[in-house]
Image: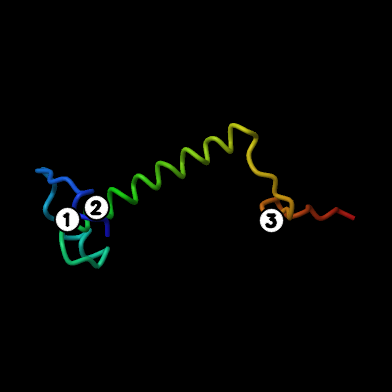
Amino acid sequence: MRSARALARKNLMVDAGNIRVLKRVLDVATESEAVRIAVRDRLALEEAQAALGRIRARGGLDDIFRRSAPPPRKSAG
């Protein structure tokens, strides 16, 4: 975990039930840790989506192994 200097105390209004579920799903001891992980993960998701958008804008990826290509059609004869 980061040092205490990197953390800032915030007073947030959140749904207590959602925080309990999040804490259980993430298997963490504190609500603060659950919120920190959720924020970190959401920021990582935003970064990944932005990177994917940049890749798409450049024409996407080339599937050199043709793994995502549809299966060849069988001929009728």
Mark on residue 67? 3
Q: Is residue 37 left or right of residue 76?
A: left
Q: Amino acid at mark 3?
A: Arg
Question: Which of the 4 image quadrants contains residue 12?
Answer: top left
Residue found at x 16% / y 45%: 8
CB-based contact (under 8 Å), mark 1 and mark 3 = no
Q: Amino acid at mark 2?
A: Arg
Q: Amino acid at mark 1?
A: Ser
* Secondary structure under the numbered disc 3 in the rendered image: loop
For the C terminus, the image quarter is: bottom right
Instruction: Please say which color scheme the image uses.
Output: rainbow
Q: Identify residue for label 1.
A: 32
Residue found at x 23% / y 48%: 6
Q: Is residue 63 above or below residue 21?
A: above
Q: Identify residue for label 2.
A: 36
The percent coordinates of residue 45 (x first, y second) are 40, 46
- Give the mark nearest the N terminus, 2 or 3: 2
